[in-house]
Image (spheres, rainbow, N blue to C red):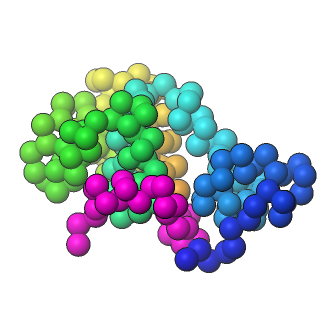
Amino acid sequence: MARLPYLNPEDLAEADRPLLKRMISLYRCVVHSPGALRAFSGLGQYIRFQAKIDPRLRELAILQVGWLAKSAYEWSHHVKIGYDFGVSDADIEGMIADSAGKPSGLDALTLLVLKGAREIYAGGMSAETFSALQAHLNNEQMVDLTVTAAFYCAVVRTLATLAIDVEPDYQKYLDKYPFPA
């Protein structure tokens, strides 16, 4: 159960009501600080719709962070969003296998992106991984990948601290790909 009440548009000042055009639990809680939600969703929208990294790789990096954090909210939302951007079940299964140190069937670039996301989650990407990724990504893409993984590290910590609940529509993604015990 969330640590703050979920707000509805009618709970907000008129100027802030558009912040809840997406009535997801995360926004309904973070909107207690409308300025924070504006900044938060602004970077999220940039990452999703303007970042120059391949959308499939972007979503796999986000999923990697969600998996490591065992963030039910992040994981369930980005399994669905990942499907919308070309992530397949084989990709998700491969990411889970790679996270456990098992063979994944994923291509070399995808494995590097996942490794980079894991390293960012742990505190920062190593020089070796960064250099290996630079063989495939330009500087803008490197920044976008870094900002994506780092931002979603912040997202999973926000979700955990505020104890944001997964909406019922997303439970099926948790059921399909549960976290290990």
Above or below residue 118? Residue 110 is above
- The residue lying at 40 percent from left, 39 percent from top is 82
Principal SS element in the magenta part? helix
Which residue, as the protein is rendered here, is positioned at the far right?
14
Between 167 and 101, the one nearer to me in the picture: 167
User: Residue 129, image x and y in percent?
Assistant: 27, 40
Q: Residue at x 36, y 54 (%)?
A: 173
Q: Is residue 114 magenta?
A: no
Name which quarter of the figure residue 146 lies in: top left
Residue 61 pos. (x, y %): 37, 43
Query: 78 or 140, which lies in front?
Result: 78
Residue interval drawn in magenta: 157-181
Answer with left or right where residue 107 lies relative to residue 125.
left
Name which quarter of the figure residue 80 lies in: top left
On screen, residue 114 versus residue 30, left or right, reads left
How far across and down, in percent of the image, does residue 35 sit?
Answer: 78, 54
As drawn, 129 above or below 120: above
Q: How many marks?
A: 0
Q: Quadrant of the C terminus?
A: bottom left
Identity of the residue drawn at 83% across and 64% down: 11
Task: Give percent across and percent down for residue 57.
Answer: 35, 34
